[in-house]
Amino acid sequence: MMLTIAMALTMTVAFAEGENDNNVQNAQAYNMRVNIAMLSKALQLNCDQVETVQLVHDQFSREMMTVAEATEEERPEKMKKAINRDLANMRYILNDEQYHTYVRILNITLYNRGLR
């Protein structure tokens, strides 16, 4: 009887630890913080664009962390809204060439993190 209780407790703790690890991994996948200097270089931003892109990207990063905290059912819709809002804002700031480069970088980032 005691052995059965000990085994049940051990399995429960192991399951809870595994679930916590999955939540941490999910949060890391949704963390969109980037090195703005490197992004600026890749997009060839001018001085005015750098600050504005950083503000927009910070907002996007906060929204993606909110997506990480959402339920499995809510995530796809919230992520779609966050991405669309980010792209709309970036479209306003960047020229055509910069925007297309940004879209490629974003898609690669999402794919590498398993979000696409």
Image (cartoon, helix red, strand yellow):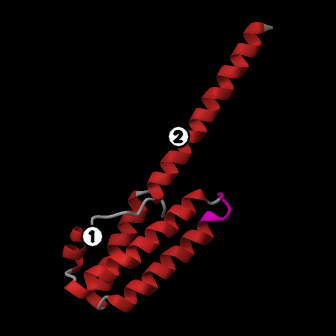
Res 100 seen here: no
What is the magenta segment's predominant secondary structure? loop
Reading the image, the residue beneath label 1 is: 36
* Type of amino acid under label 1: Ile
Does residue 81 lie above or below 15 as drawn?
below
Secondary structure category for the residue under label 2: helix
* Figure quadrant of residue 38: bottom left
Residue extending furthest toward the right: 1
User: Quadrant location of the N terminus?
Assistant: top right
Q: Nearer the viewer, residue 102 or 23?
A: 23
* Circles 1, 2 touching at the beta carbon (< 8 Å): no
- Residue sitting at 33 percent across and 83 percent down? 52
- Tag 2 residue: 21
Q: Is residue 9 left or right of residue 91?
A: right
In magenta, the rendered stretch is 71-75
> Which residue shows up at 22% across the image and 70% down it?
37
